[in-house]
Image (cartoon, helix red, strand yellow):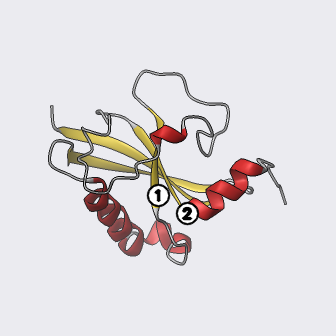
Amino acid sequence: MTGATLTVRVIRNFEYRTLKNVVFHDIDLATTTVDQFKKIIDERIQTDPSLKIYRTTHFDTLKIYVKAQQHKTQNLAINLDHDDWILNDGAKTLSLCGIENETELSYFELAAYKAYQANPVQKWL
């Protein structure tokens, strides 16, 4: 199966847990590269009215949050474990990165993630 459904957590802020889940249908895992999928996500952010507040954030990193039928992490925004799940190679296809149908991904700014990882404190207004 190559036409997959993927859920992407678009994360604007880790501390305040400002994020939105966006579902992408019919993604060809065998031919779509990481960089191509980032462009697809960026295009959705720029055109979807419900994502308007995310348009000023610089997103540069994709990370697997959880694969289908696996246990989710306690952190509702991002999986702080498994830094090897960060998709660094933009030329690799999604299937070569281990992404399967119904995988959940996080899309965020790497510098903000590193800062949050060093001090994972939730702030509430």
Image quarter where the N terminus lies is: top left
Residue at 83% of width from left, 55% of height from top?
Answer: 124
Furthest residue toward bottom:
56
Sequence-earlier tag: 2 or 1: 1
Structural distance between the alpha carbons of marks 2 and 1: 6 Å
Residue at 73% of width from left, 57% of height from top?
Answer: 16
Q: Quadrant of residue 110?
A: bottom right
Q: Amino acid at mark 1?
A: Thr
Image position, residue 11 (x, y; %): 57, 57
Image position, residue 80 (x, y; %): 63, 40
Q: Nearer the viewer, residue 116 or 45?
A: 116
Image position, residue 86 (x, y; %): 46, 46
Residue under label 1: 61
Residue under label 2: 109
Residue at 38% of width from left, 36% of height from top?
Answer: 103
Q: Amino acid at mark 2?
A: Glu
Q: Secondary structure at mark 1?
A: strand
Residues at badges 2 and 1 in contact (C-beta under 8 Å)? yes
